[in-house]
Amino acid sequence: MNYNVAVIPGDGIGPEIITEAKKVLDKIGEKYGHKFTYTEVLMGGVSIDATGVPLTEEALETAGKSDSVLLGAVGGKVGQSNWYSLPPHLRPEAGLLAIRKGLGLFANLRPAVLFDELKGACPLKDEIIGDGFDFVVVRELTGGLYFGERKTYEENGLRKAMDTLVYDENEIKRIAKWAFEIAKKRNKKVCSVDKANVIDSSRLWRQVVKEVSADYPEVELSDMLVDNCAMQIVKDPKQFDVILTENMFGDILSDEASMITGSIGMLASASLGDTKLGLYEPSHGSAPDIAGQDKANPIATILSAAMMLRYSFDLEEEADRVEEAVKTVLKKGYRTVDIMSEGKTLVGTKEMGDRITDEI
Ligand code: NAD
Ligand code: IPM
Ligand code: MN
C-alpha cells in the first residue's frame, strides 16, 4: 500500500532527525511491502526565508491532502535570529500553531515511558524509578492561552500585555473523551490536571471532565492541581497512567516528563483530530545549540514515526517493530550525547538512525 506523507523538516536539528526517521520508515516499507511517498513542505523559519510567512496556504493544503504529516521542529534562537524581529504571527512557531489548528488536531499525545535500558540516564533515584513508569500526557492542543485573544499595548504611560485563556465545554468534552478512551486501553486511570483553585477555565474544565467520566465507569478519575502535578511527576511518576490537561499546562508538564525518561530527545508525540490524518513530531524544539553537529538524538522523531504507523495507518506490527528496534539499539549500549552514561558507546545522530534501521 502507498502512504503519502507530508514531511516538514523545519529548522535547526529538524532536517537531521527527519532524515533518520525517513530511513526507518523506508526500511519498514521494504520489509513489509509498503511504500511511503514523501512530499516536502516548508514551515517555520525556512518558510519565512523562502516565502515571507511561516506557513503558506499551499503548504497547509498539501499537508491536509496527505495521509499524515511528519515534522522535525521549527524555530531559531530567540534574540539571535532575524525571524524574531517579525510580528508574532509571522514567526516560525506561528506556523506550527497554524498547522495544528488548520488540520483540527486538538489531541496531543505525549507518551512518557522509561525504557529499562535508559534507567542510567534518568535523573531520579533508583527507589523512585523502581521497575519504571509508563504514562501518557493527553494535552489539549488547539485552545487555551495559545489561541486566545492577545495584545501588547500602552496604558497610562505603562507598557502592558494581555493573553486570554478561553475554553468552551465542547473543546473540553472532546479532549476528555480522548483521554478516557486511551485510559480504557491502558491502566484505566485518568488524572485531570488543572488550576481550579484559581482560574475559571479550570473550574469549567474540572466540571466537564467529571461529566464525561460518567460515560466511563470502568476508568478511575482523579483531579490534581498543576503545581502539585509538576512535583508529583518527579516524586512518584509511577502513580500516573493518563494525565489529561489543557494546552499550556500540557506543554510544560510534557517537557518535565520527557526529562525523567532520560532526555527531551526521547519524547515522541502525535497530534490527532477527528480523522486519520495526524501530525507526528518530537516534543522537543529545533535545538539551535546543537544543530548541524550530528549530536541530536533522533529517537523521539523515530518513535513519532512509529506512532504515525500505529494511529494514522493502523500498522500495529510495524510500529511495534520500530519500538523494538529502538530498544535493541539501546540495549546494545549505543547512546547519543543527551542520554550518554558511563560504559556506553557514544554515537551521533546518523549512526543512531543507521543502527535502528539495521535492527528492523
Ligand atoms: P529545545 O527543545 O529546542 O532545546 C532545549 C534543550 O534540549 C537544548 O539544550 C537542546 O540542545 C536539547 N535538545 C532538544 N532536542 C534534542 C535532541 N533531539 N537531542 C539532544 N538534545 C536535544 O527548546 P528551546 O531551546 O527552548 O527552543 C528552541 C527553538 O525551538 C525555539 O524557537 C522554540 O520555539 C522551538 N520549539 C519548537 C518546537 C516544535 O517545533 N515542535 C518545540 C519546542 C520548541
Ligand atoms: C511544543 C512546542 C510548541 C508548543 C511551541 C514551539 C509553539 O513547545 O510542541 O511543545 O508550545 O506547543
Ligand atoms: Mn513544548
Image (cartoon, helix red, strand yellow):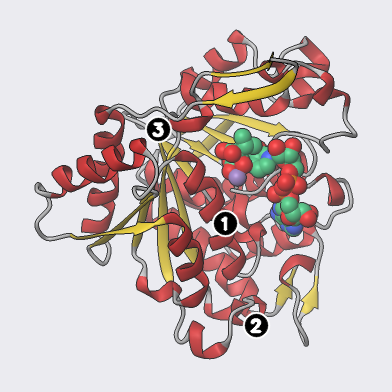
Q: Which of marks 3 and 2 is nearer the N terminus?
A: 3
Residue 265 in the image, given as x and y percentages of width and height = 66, 58
Q: Could you give the CA–CA distance between mark 3 and mark 2, rounded to whole angstroms?
A: 34 Å
Q: Could you give the CA–CA distance between mark 3 and mark 1, rounded to whole angstroms?
A: 19 Å
Ligand 2 located in image quadrant: top right
Q: Which amino acid type is marked by label 1?
A: Leu
Q: Earlier in the sequence, mark 2 or mark 1?
A: 2
- Give the residue pinned by disc 1: 267
Q: Which amino acid type is marked by label 3?
A: Phe
Q: Is residue 359 above or below residue 78?
A: below
**Which residue is drawn at the image coordinates 46% and 79% (left, top)?**
132
- In-image side of 104 versus 292 (left or right): left
Please name which of the two marks, 3 or 1, marks the residue nearer to the observer: 3
* Quadrant of the rendering where the N terminus is positioned: top left
Residue 62 in the image, given as x and y percentages of width and height = 55, 16
- Give the residue pinned by disc 2: 120
Q: Is residue 224 above or below residue 93?
A: below
Q: Is mark 3 within 8 Å of ligand 2?
A: no
In the image, 201 versus 69, the foreground residue is 201
Give SS at disc 2. helix
In the image, 74 versus 17, the foreground residue is 74
